[in-house]
Structure formats: C-alpha cells, structure tokens
Image: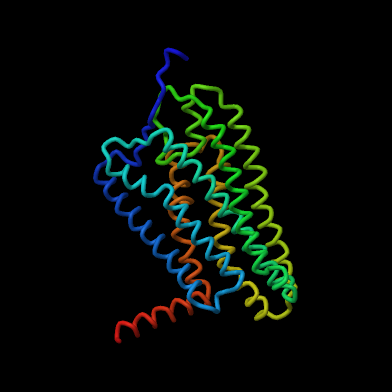
Amino acid sequence: MENQTTVTEFILRKLSSDPQLQIFLFLMFLVIYLITLAGNIVIMVVIRADSHLHIPMYFLLFHLSFVDICYSSATVPNTLINLLAEHKTISVNGCIAQMFFFFLLVVTEAFILSAMAYDRYAAICDPLRYMERMSKWICIQLVGGAWAISFFHALLNTVFTLKLHFCGPNQIHHFSCELPPLLQLSCTDTVTNQVVLLTSAMIFASSAFLLTLISYIHIISTILRIRSAEGRHKAFSTCSSHLIVVVLFYLTGFLRYTKPSSASSVVLDEIFSIQYSILTPMLNPIIYSLKNKEVKTAIGKMLGKLKFLKKC
C-alpha cells in the first residue's frame, strides 16, 4: 500500500465521444432539468395556494415534488457541466457526497410513494375513518419517517464507503457517482460494502415496495367489489396518477438492478440511470397535472389569476 498512489479525483465516463452529440445531449438534459424544476415548483405552489388541496393526498404530493427537485439536482447539474468540460472529473469527496444524496433521495421517494399508497388505501378501503387514519400529525410522521429512514440508509452506506482506498484506475464507467461502479475501483476489499448495500436495500427499499404492493392489493380488491362501473371508475381515477408514477419508478429500478448478466452493459446501465434520475422527476408532475382533475383545476385558476393581474 505504501507504493500506491491515492486517487484524489475520478474521471466520469463520457456519454458520447462525438462533440456534436454531446452538445445535443447538453441541450436535451438542460431542457429536461428546467421542465423538472418548473413542473415540480408549479405543483408545490398550486398546492400551497389552493385551500381545496390542503388535504393529506396533496400534502404528500407536495413533498414528492420537493424530493424530485432535490433528486434531479443531485446529478443533472454536474452531468451538464461534464458534458461541456474537456476533462469530466469529480473529486473523491464530491463523488461520495453525490452518492450519499442519491441514496438519501431515492429511498425517501420510495417511502413517500408508500405513504401515498397508504393514503389511497385509507381513502378507498376505509373512507369513514380516513381523516382519523390520515390526520395532519400522521402525515408529518410519515414524511419525517421517510427522511429519517433514508438518512440512516444513506449514512450507513457512505460510512463504509469512506473506509475504502482508491489507488487507480480512477475512471468510473458511468456518468454519475453510484456505489456499484465506485466499488469496482477500490484497492481494498469491498465485501463488507456489498453486504451492507444488499442488506440495507433488502430491509429499506424492499419494505417500501412491499408496503406499496400490499396497499394496492387491498385497493384493487376493494375496487373490484364495487358493483357499479361508474363507482369503480371513480375509485380507480383517484389513484391512477400515483399508480403510474409507482410503476414507472419501480419498473426502471427493477430493470436496472435485476437484468441478466448477458445484458449487462455500460450503455444499458446508463439508459436506465437516465430514466430514473433524470426523466422520472420530470414525468411525475406532468402525470399528476394531466391525470388529476383537482390539480388541473387549481393550475387553471392560478393561470386565470395571473392573466387578470396582467390586464390590471
């Protein structure tokens, strides 16, 4: 170990070696990032401004939008800089910090989606006790618990990563810092890190998924027992937006981490990573805006007020 050089920065993999394509990707990611910020900020402002949306479902949606802004901001700005930079580098500490925020935000999003699934379960399966089950204090506990669990999960993996030594090579075969490609560059044994990553993922990420799955099993069974087609449609419409977001979030992650080894490639990994770290935070507010009548109505009211103020 004495003759080994300590790596102080990593080189991130280029998404393309074609300069013109890099400029195109820069512009595309910039537009996506701006839409992500604008869409989620609009959702948050509308929920705050419209008193009709001061209910548990939109309280949770407000925090989901906030997480999406943070989630996208943890990777996209650095990716944009690297697309234009001649040498796409990031310091070791910066890389580990980015990894920490990735863990923090992706698990927080998973648990907030679980809380939203429970909210829909309470509304559809037990409507008479809905306000008791989803009181303001319970909503605060659900959101606070999501952040606390995610912080512990991120801290646990980060602490063990800080114990690793990197002495070269220093090229990460990815456009951002995630733990699996980072472990491949370590000069020290990574068995402990892999065990911690797998165990924490099984405990935290799997529990969030199971909570969501159990909620939707009860929701779907309740909807199927509704006799009228109109009643079934109305009940399903109240959770359709959330269900689309959940499927998008988990399907991408499932494909990213469970694909067969024969399909394992850097390009495929990057496609899935772009989907869940860049595209999903942009799509969430669009899905809720298009599929949710109350959100569309609130946005329409806000736009109407803005037009009125311009005329004045």
Residue 213 appears at what percent x and percent y?
Answer: 67, 57
Q: Quadrant of residue 16?
A: top left
User: Residue at position x 24%, y 46% from top?
Assistant: 20
For this orientation, the residue located farthest to the top is 3
In the image: residue 18, left or right of residue 109: left
In the image: residue 183, left or right of residue 221: left
User: Residue at position x 67%, y 44% from top?
Assistant: 203
For this orientation, the residue located farthest to the left is 20
Which scheme is used to colour this image of the protein?
A: rainbow
Up-down: is 5 above or below 51?
above
In the image shown, does 276 or 150 lie closer to the viewer?
A: 150
In the image shown, does 287 or 182 lie closer to the viewer?
A: 182
Residue 283 appears at what percent x and percent y?
Answer: 46, 61
In the image shown, does 25 or 171 lie closer to the viewer?
A: 171
Residue 109 appears at what percent x and percent y?
Answer: 56, 54
Up-down: is 165 above or below 208?
above
In the image shown, does 180 or 92 lie closer to the viewer?
A: 92
User: Residue at position x 69%, y 61% from top?
Assistant: 215
Q: Quadrant of residue 4?
A: top left
User: Residue at position x 36%, y 45% from top?
Assistant: 79
Up-down: is 34 above or below 166?
below
Quadrant where the image shows the C terminus:
bottom left
